[in-house]
Amino acid sequence: MSFGYVVLAAVVLLCAWMARVNARYTAAEAARAQGPDAEVESLWSVFGLPEQGSDLPARVGDLLERVTPDDLRTKHGVVALAIMAARSGHHDVLEALARRAARLDGGCGETAALGVLAAAYGGDLRLAMERQSQSQSAMASCASCGASGDAKILLQEAEIALDALRSGALETAGEALHLRVG
């Protein structure tokens, strides 16, 4: 067999391998476009827009009834759902979302910030402060975390919750948590 045939066979094998990789990637993208992450993304894309009205907390609640943290496959889906849950008063799911984020990307600053948010709304100042330190360290070492819009929003939410916990504005009433108004 001549060198030309060997090169041609190698090119054909490489093309076949690339086609398989592309097919798997396309199938994974299609699954994400229809699954729980897509449901989260759909609500996230309109969350907070004034024209959506005041029913968004209820829509987040409905979403949380259909989608569990373990259903989510992307860190973005977990972070978006955590931000929406925090802003709409669904604090009970935050620790489960923080655990899910840790399984998806344990060393990430966003993951650590989710832990801060969960601990603050859980009423544990010591744990929230410990997680805050870990979060800042992870964010400082990761250029992509600090640059993402989701990360910035998440960090703001974590800081708001931590400040409220420190000041005593975050109260525990049984298992329900809320911010004091006024």
Image (cartoon, grey):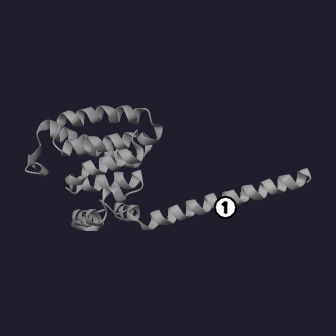
**What is the count of numbered marks?**
1
Seen at 30% across and 51% down, the residue is 97
Q: Position of residue 177 (x, y in %)?
A: 13, 50
Seen at 28% across and 42% down, the residue is 115
Seen at 30% across and 52% down, the residue is 82
What residue sits right under mark 1 in the picture?
19
Q: Position of residue 139 (x, y in %)?
A: 39, 36
On the picture, is 4 further left or further right than 31? right
Q: Position of residue 141 (x, y in %)?
A: 44, 32
Badge 1: how crowded within 10 Å, few (<14), some, or many (20+)?
A: few
Residue positioned most to the right: 2
Q: Amino acid at mark 1?
A: Ala
Is 63 in front, or is 160?
63
On the picture, is 102 further left or further right than 123? right
- Quadrant position of the N terminus in the picture: bottom right
Question: Does residue 131 lie above or below 25 as drawn?
Answer: above
Query: Which quadrant would residue 89 be assigned to in this image?
Result: bottom left
Q: Position of residue 171 (x, y in %)?
A: 10, 45
Query: Which quadrant would residue 151 be assigned to in this image?
Result: top left
Query: Which quadrant would residue 69 be assigned to in this image?
Result: bottom left
Is 157 in front, or is 71?
71
Element type at marker 1? helix
